[in-house]
Amino acid sequence: MRSVGILGSVAPEATVLLMQKLLDVVPETMSGAGVPLVVHHNPQMPDRLRDPSQGGGVDPMPVLVSMAQDLERAGVAALATPCLFTHHYALAISHATTLPFLNMIELVADDLAASGAKRVAMRMAPEIRRTGLFDMAFGQRGLTQLWAESEHAKADCSLSHGSGWPAATDPPAGHAAPPVMDCLDCLASGIVAFARADGKRLDVVG
């Protein structure tokens, strides 16, 4: 299998959860068939939610670029990150190396579109909405983001990111709860497809 370099999240939980999902997707009978990973965890990463152009802190882009280049030198075949906020700098990361970047936002949008969903209940922190991370990818695929809880009953699918986000509220009487898709499941499936070199996506749930 081809190896993948992981730009670790500032909060290590998302990185650890992604690694667990990648372990879980490989059957116990396939000894040695796991995805080769090189994880670059840097807890000194500047806060990616504070915009330095608005006096909000240190620009994290140079650190992310340096991490991506470190991973390329380590010999990985592609890059990925479980951190949603890091995807704000996806273009800079992609241009920093010759490696493909497995973009979680794009993978999520592809999976939602393939499922037939049109209206997506966004079960995420409000900071995600302010960054507009999903706007372009969703717009290109005709997906509508529903952020207000009052709109979630209209959704075809709910989207979360790992653990720690608010649980879905109970649907109104007479309405079935929409299926839930996890961003990290989509990323794990995309990583496995790349590592296998055959492009075959596997279901990753859990």
Image (cartoon, rainbow, N blue to C red):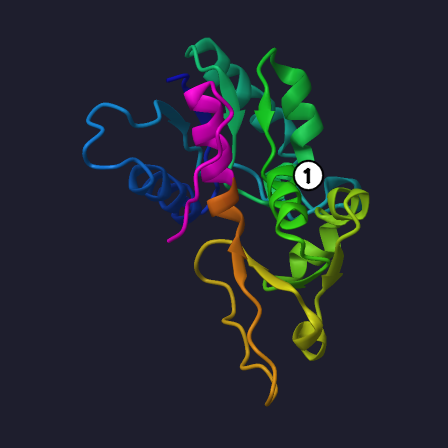
Kindly give the residue lying farthest to the bottom in the view shown. Answer: 173
- For disc 1, the marked residue is 88
129 drawn magenta: no
Residue type of the residue flagged with mark 1:
His
Q: Which of 59 and 176 is in front in this view?
A: 176
Magenta highlight range: 187-206
Residue at position x 34%, y 40% in the image: 25
| Residue 124 visible from this viewpoint | no
Residue neighbourhood size for the residue with mark 1, other residues' Cα within 10 Å, grouped as few (<14), some (14–19), many (≥20) = some
Residue at position x 66%, y 31% in the image: 90
Local secondary structure at mark 1: helix
In the rendered view, tell whether residue 189 sits above or below residue 78.
below
Horizontal side of residue 11 vs 101, given as left or right: left
How far across and how far down the image is residue 185, in percent? Answer: 47, 46
Q: Which of 50 and 18 is in front in this view?
A: 18
How far across and how far down the image is residue 169, in percent? Answer: 55, 78
Mark count: 1
